[in-house]
Amino acid sequence: MCGIVGFAGSEQAAPILLEGLERLEYRGYDSAGVAVVSPERGLQVRKSKGRLKVLEALTDGGRSLDGCVGIGHTRWATHGEPNDVNSHPHLSQSGRIAVVHNGIIENYLELKEFLTSQGTVFCSDTDTEVVAQLMDYYYLRSGDLMDAVYKTLHRLEGAYALGILCLETPDRFIAARKDAPLLLGYGEGCSFIASDVTALLRHTREVSYMEDGEVAVVSADEIVVYDAMGRRVEKEHRIVDWDVSAAEKGGYEHFMFKEIMEQPEAVRKTISPRIRDGRVVFDELKLGADFIRSLERIFIVACGSSYHVGVVGKYNLERLLRVPVEVALASEFRYADPLVGPGSLVIVISQSGETLDSMAALRLAKSLGATVLSIVNVVGSSIARESDEVLYTWAGPEIAVATTKAYSTQLVLLDMLGLFFAETRGSVSSADYALLLSELQALPARMESVLEDTEKIKYLASRYFNHDSVFYIGRNLDYALGLESSLKLKEISYVHSEAYASGELKHGTISLIEPGTLVVALGTYTPLFDKALSNIVEVQSRGADVLALTTESRAQDLRRTVEHVLTVPDTHPILEPSLGIIPMQLFAYYVALQRGCDIDKPRNLAKSVTVE
Ligand code: M6R
């Protein structure tokens, strides 16, 4: 999704902006641009379709642009095709205002019509140009930039994070936010804005998060923030403790592989501080025991892989709590008139904490009186801030578009939450509680052992990488695991794949199985292992090539039937998805590698989906 950076200091701005944009590349983009202002050379805008290196070449690494104040943008097209003209920054007709924008201006056509009637000539197809032109319109009439900014913002409907540069104020720029993330960074003698903290880590760790309606005036020495009514606001400064190297590749060919390898550590960091004296402890939760005991229904709402964590969560929480759990796609939940109310707990899961549909679902749930608990990776993100309760996954920055370590940390955190609630409700025996807890603690070491041997997976990927269609089958938790495994494969390797609950095969899908079809059969959920085996025989007898995954204890039984069997260590059955996902991530990774795909930045995808 689009990325924004802004800088005001005493150094040349453009090289710093380009470096910041590079750190945002992982969000996915199709074009990039910068605007810099200086008293001598005025407003200079350079932008181009394609990768950042095109822009770097165009500006000699930023050195050809003069000025210490500027804004930059990576665009992921929503309005208008990806081309040079539609790229940001957008310059107003008079050449006085340049704007970068994340989000969508919903009433842009109406505003465009108004401005056209006033003589404005537009050059792009974007909604963003409307913002630059409208601001210009007001600025030319009042000569007061802040007045023009506020008048413009009051007319905008939709979502925006904005960086605004003005020819006549070369010592500062303006930032504004509504429903799209934007943070302020405080450096030594310099100031920043960014849509994502990873753009700032090289320069500062001191940040504050802009709230909806706020407008910031950013100059080298200070950032002054105002609310929607123009009143001054004192911002709370926070220190980001993410490691810079965690946001870099550290010798690996791809972020995705690095992040797969980081999973044991990320899970350890997420679990360990929350286990004390043989119990799960959530110091950060304020939920009362009475509320937990009186829970009648839980909703888990999320998108993509985070939703798949929710599918595992449904099975596991219902098992542990004996309370109905509904899992919903945020994009469906928000329009479904859900039966949520006071007394309901809605768990929102999101790595980025900025996914628009999840955010909308959260707001809907809150407006209906529910308590919202979010599981989020990015500290201070919008979802974290608007939730009643937040549990952070401590996975560190996840750069690859395909999530791996965030998924794994979400999964263990949800399992821990299940245990915590179950203990409070008395729905788990102390023996089961102790067993599950010790198995949870053993997970990181077991994940390490899965990661020790990647050769077999690499070999299998080289054997199957040219299949056009792959089916993942499994029952219960293996079905949930199949959903995520299938998404991993399709998003990075562009191989068509589907996940099916094995019991559904006979209801239609089995007609697609023909000689040579690859079926990945998941049999890690040992209570249903025998059922998994019969489904394997079923597809084999129709000619499918089967690649199976099971636990070490059941591998022998499977090897009698299937040639290619991958294994993971045994653990408590409800924790198996945490181990089973690793070979599946690696399989997707190696298939994508064989197919020569852009693994960290798959086509058409973005890391953080902040538009509907
Ligand atoms: O940041 P979120 O967890 O809210 O993101 C949700 C999905 O966009 C995300 O999981 C997506 O499906 C990933 N590309 C999967 O790898």
Image (spheres, rainbow, N blue to C red):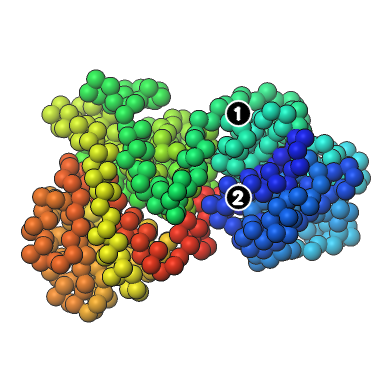
Where 1 sits versus 318, above or below? below
Q: Earlier in the sequence, mark 1 or mark 2?
A: 2
State yes or no: Cβ of the residue under disc 1 lies below 8 Å from any atom of ligand 1: no
The residue shown at (39%, 25%) is 285
**Crowdedness near tag 1: few (<14), some (14–19) or many (≥20) residues, C-alpha within 10 Å:** some
Where 13 sits versus 519, above or below? above
Circle 2 residue: 22
Amino acid identity at mark 2 = Glu
Q: Is residue 442 left or right of residue 132?
A: left
Where 6 sits versus 597, above or below? above
Q: Residue 206: which disc?
A: 1
Looking at the rendered structure, the secondary structure element under dot 1 is strand
Looking at the rendered structure, the secondary structure element under dot 2 is helix
Say which of 364 and 524 sits in front.
524
Q: Residue 432: which disc?
A: none
Residue 91 visible to an observer of this rendering: yes
The residue shown at (88%, 38%) is 144
The residue shown at (86%, 53%) is 95
